[in-house]
Amino acid sequence: MWKLKIAEGGNDPYLYSTNNFLGRQTWEFDPNAGTPEERAKVEEARQNYYKNRFHVKPSSDLLWQMQSIKEKNFKQTIPQVKIKDGEEITCEKATAALRRGVHLLSALQASDGHWPAANDGPMFFFPPLTMALYITGHLNTVFPAEHRKEILRYIYCHQNEDGGWGLHIEGHSIMFSTALNYICMRLLGEGPDGGQDNACERARKWILDRGGVTTIPSWGKTWLSIFGLFDWSGCHPIPPEFWMLPSYFPIHPAKMWCYCRVTYLPMSYLYGRKFVGPITPLILQLREELHIEPYHKINWRQKRHLCAKEDLYYPHTLLQMLLWDSLYTFTEPLLSRWPFNKLREKALQITMYLIHYEDECSRYITIGCVEKPLCMLACWAEDPTGDYFKKHLARIADILWIGEDGMKVQSFGSQVWDSGFAIQALLASDLTDEIRPTLMKGHYFIKHSQVKDNPPGDFKRMFRHISKGSWTFSDQDHGWQLSDCTAESLKCCLYFSKMRPEIVGEKMEPEKFYDAVNVLLSLQSENGGLAGWEPATGGLWIEWLNPVEFLEDIVIEHEYVECTASTIQALVLFSEYDPEHRKEEIEKCISKAVQFLENTQKPDGSWYAAWGICFIYATWFALGGLAAAGKTYNNCLAVRKGVNFLLEIQTDDGGWGESYLSCPNKVYTPLEGKRSNLVHTAMALMGLIHGGQAKRDPKPLHRAAKLLINSQLPDGDFPQQEMIGVFKMNCMLHYASYRKYFPTWALAEYRKHVPLPSKSI
């Protein structure tokens, strides 16, 4: 059986940590673990998922839940409650449902204080890692038989009925994901016609019916060129000389969004070297299987601008095409000849130096799973036996996760993000006496996950921003500051600062609060909005150069509604903690942030989210931020419009539900059949409470609470439904814990703010 190990580093000499691996979560297979009954239960969960995979595509994360419940010897002892039609919700029934959710949430906390959970969904995350390990010769070492079995399970579980795979598990089939997953299956031992339910044959037919892999988008062309299934002459140039540009240049690395920058950093190194992995017999077979014409007869130059229509979400602009064609026709031929090839050699050295810097700053987790195999492969290409590559191998386990749908690659883990929300849900319940150990451990985890230092050396020269005092999305070792994670974690620590030490442990030092505030203030733009990772300094016109066909707004950093609203709430709380610290700056920051929220509201009263689906998600954040700043239904038009938006889209069963199509289409789109999603219902319920709906007309709140209470499962959990996360408008993310803490949090706020009768009266 598989077991999740918490905060362990083992004895690997190439593994190191800044805080003793707090928050680290790695899966290990033990062939002797588990009773026959436990193994049967796991297998039943797998079979149930596979049978229902087209009905509910995200997994319920049951393997970790089974493990944690067993370790805690948890049994739900509070009787399940239901609200009948026409029945009034009493305080007792609301409290019972809340306690059931709180007790389960407490049981799912890890020993180090965080809440482990899957953070997956995109179908292009795993194959590049498999391809990189195949090239380096480490595939079977890193992924022994049980790993390969679970990787294949995940691929089979999420193959669409037409034979392809989507950009994410709920999406329509695209060439990028389908080609990469086909290659992945073949690398893991499946034959051309192998795989569960003829997975390989069906996938290959999907690819060939659409002209073969020459129509794969640019990232796919890069990976296929690295792998020997495409030719670099069919790719758009990614010159490593870019990293040598002077800072005054209009397009400069420091102006790029950090994820875009760190993705194209190793890509440019591999492109600059025209690196190609070993051409094995399997590679030669794949050349025959994936192209519709003989490999040696393909005119690669003509394939550069091809992109399958299924993949094309963000077409390249004329400016981007002209830039690429100029580089391809004039610059690249020049840089391949003496003496200009000396410039290429120097650029490759600088690029590799920057890769090593980024790797070290993240303890080789790297900024994300897209960048991980690229950076790892660049290190191997430089020195196959070097320590840099070995340090990368040691951190592969950090991004892997096991569910009933198989083994998946996470973005890089959401430990801090999930824990911050789980803690706020528990604190809102006012059930402190029942969960004291949980709160103390949660406080410890959040406190000790705060980033202690800025990036090393002259970090600004390395295009980096301050990080001291921030929190990351995952754990301290990751190292990358993020404004909303910093704000939500700061809120938790500020709440804990008001509680007795015997309940929550030692409080955080004032200097740590000041450091967090400093990071938040540094990320505000002139328009009042908060950026995510680094200040938004690039001009919007730079987005015209977006090189990725299936994502939007990836070139530069932007301001986000969610980050802005979270920061308002955190700074308002901090001002209660220390009213005099940087008082004028904080007041100005809050005022400008409020103005940003008001200015970015849509005509229908909603807000557009960057990191969740979508208008409901952002509206909950925005109403919370406005309420924290003292804005009410009576004194703020934006609040009134936001409340009215939520009321207008409430479904017949009392809930709310929004399709992921809202994100790419940028128009509110309800779920098919106007059905509800419990996480959306929880967010809308809390948004309305922020907007003071309880004082005007609580009926919509009662209807929503009834749906949440009646949907609760016997163990206190809530059913898994559609995904709620997104990044860059077109790729959805699955946060497995959202269904646990958001409905619980909403019931806590409902019980606290909505007057309820007591049956004892």
Image (tube, rainbow, N blue to C red):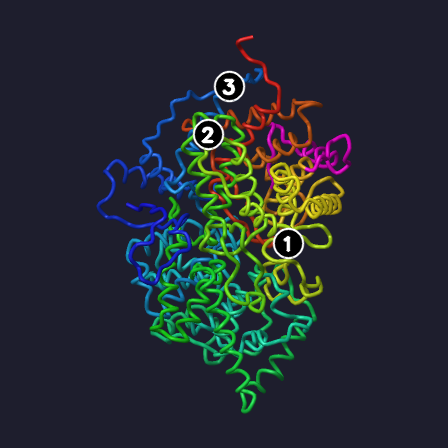
x and y percentages locating residue 732 in the rendered image: 54, 50
Which numbered disc flags the more N-terminal residue, 3 or 1? 3
Instruction: Find the magenta span and give its range.
Output: 629-658
Q: CA distance from mark 2 to mark 3?
A: 14 Å
Can residue 616 be spotted in the picture? Answer: no
Residue that badge 1 annotates: 523
In depth, the one of 426 and 702 nearer the eye is 426
Residue that badge 3 annotates: 93
Residue 601 vs residue 301: left or right? right
Label ID, residue 102? 2
Residue 566 vs residue 179: left or right? right
Label ID, residue 92? none
**Residue type beneath disc 2:** Val
Residue 635 covered by magenta stretch: yes
**Residue type beneath disc 1:** Leu
Q: Tags 2 and 3 in contact by the CB under 8 Å rule?
A: no
**Residue type beneath disc 3:** Lys
Label 2 neighbourhood size at 10 Å, few (<14), some (14-19), many (20+)?
many
Badge 2 element? helix
Q: Nearer the viewer, mark 2 or mark 1?
A: 1
